[in-house]
Amino acid sequence: MGDPTEGALVVAAARFGLWKDEMERHMPRVGEVPFTSERKRMTTVHRVPGEGECDAAAVCFVRDLVEAPYVAFTKGSVDELVKICDRVWNDGHIEPLTENWTTRIQTANNDLAKDGMRVLGVAMRPLEDTPANGDEDALERDLVFVGMTGMIDPPREEARQAVAECRTAGIRPVMITGDHPLTALNIARQLGIVGAEVENPRVVSGTELAAMSVEELEEIVEDVSVYARVSPEHKVKIVEALKDKGHIVAMTGDGVNDAPALKRADIGVAMGITGTDVSKEASDMILLDDNFATIVNAVEEGRTIYDNIRKFVRYIVSCNVGEILLMLLAPLFNLPVPLTAVQLLWINLVTDGLPALALGLEPAAPDTMRRPPNPPDESVLARGLGRYVLLVGILLGAVSLATEFITKDLDHAVWQTMVFTTLGLAQMSNVLSVRAEDRSVFSVGFFSNPPLIGAVLLTVVLQAFVVYVPFLQTVFDTRPLSPTELGVAAGLAVLLFFILEGVKAFRRQPGANARGE
């Protein structure tokens, strides 16, 4: 339980026989300076037991080493820790921290970081008295550098896959971390954030960011994928630079200081497990499992929902255009009014409504995460949807009008029933074709959306009831159709399906886009 870094240290200590409960009992904590991203370290103060107060060998060793009633332990960034140390613990005794020692420490730190280790330095300082709680200036100076620990959190396999999916989906992942630049670069390579083909990728440090203006950062921000030793305020600068370059930015964070960047980003993503309440309030989305792959899943889900909204609009509006054209054009061609009010109402409520609702359950298309994002200011009618609505509406109206023209010499109620049935069944052809915008509906799996197939079958059955059940014939002013009459109506409706699929097949031809089709 708790922070993974702290947990790793507790486990490492236990392997050397230093049990947390025992250490806390013999050397209780009496003060602390909490971790901050600016200092990149934290300090705790402990009371040292006197002679005869304990028999733990490790505690006795510390007591003999510090020779003081209290001791302060500090852990954090090796680079920052060395700056406040003036001595080093070497083979059981303390000696001055010389330039040679500093070089050795930095070399060891870099060697661990190159291997992807997260490195923490550890230092201590004997105290004769306890300073005021939280007085960092009094505690964090003249320290004795003790050593360093290296730990690694291997990237999850799903994280690598998620990064790869981001790239194919037109999303560029950027790593922003407080870790050593070499550690960050190693992890970025493992995850695929930095490609293996990039020989000398640039890693921008927090120190460099602090010296840059937003305008200066804008010049390099599109080429940098790794930022290391970064403080939370630097995140805001990165977000602003990316947004100024016209990018849509999602930012993750979990700390109180991450709130400004989460708020400034187009989409702030807070961690649900390790995140603070402040970061969650400032964010637009909260990850309940703190897993980067979940963000990618959310992107796919969002794209699928948007695609289904467009399918819904394509279907509903094209059907309505077809109905309007049918009702308007029939009198212009000196034909009787093709549908009664109650029949038109049935078309709008049943044959339009049920399949349209089922379109919202359409699964993600195979290429959902293999295409770039759409512009955020794009109209829902963009990318040919408006043209599709108009053309299919014309086709629906034409097929229905053709039915009336062919059958106008039959009994009035019969030809009107045929027009009514043709329009209803033609809309089923339309909804089946709408499922795939450019691909054949058979390529996405004809039965991959069972609710839609169920809605289409139910609509066909209900339409049959309206035509053949005597009670409903009276309500909807219909007549039973003979097999031939029903075959003509169904054939014209199916013809629309093959026309729509044929148009998509033509558009998929290699030269179609070049010809502006």
Image: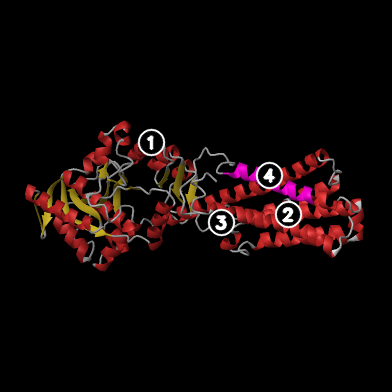
Q: Is mark 3 on a helix, strand or loop?
A: loop
For label 2, the residue is 426
Q: Is residue 194 left or right of residue 423?
A: left
**289 to the left or right of 429:** left
Q: What residue type is labelled 2?
A: Ala
- Which label's residue is closer to the chain start, 3 or 2? 2
* Residue linked to disc 3: 439
**Cα distance, mark 3 to mark 4?**
21 Å
Query: What is the distance, in whole Å, between disc 3 and disc 1 at their CAs?
Result: 34 Å
Q: Distance between the residues labelled 4 and 2?
A: 14 Å
Q: What residue type is labelled 1?
A: Lys
Whole-Å distance between the Cαs marked 1 and 4? Answer: 37 Å
| Circle 1 residue | 245
Looking at this view, is 54 or 445 the one in front?
445
Percent x, y for residue 287?
A: 47, 52
Which comes before the other along the chain, label 3 or label 1?
1
Left/right of residue 222 with respect to residue 452 in the rendered view: left
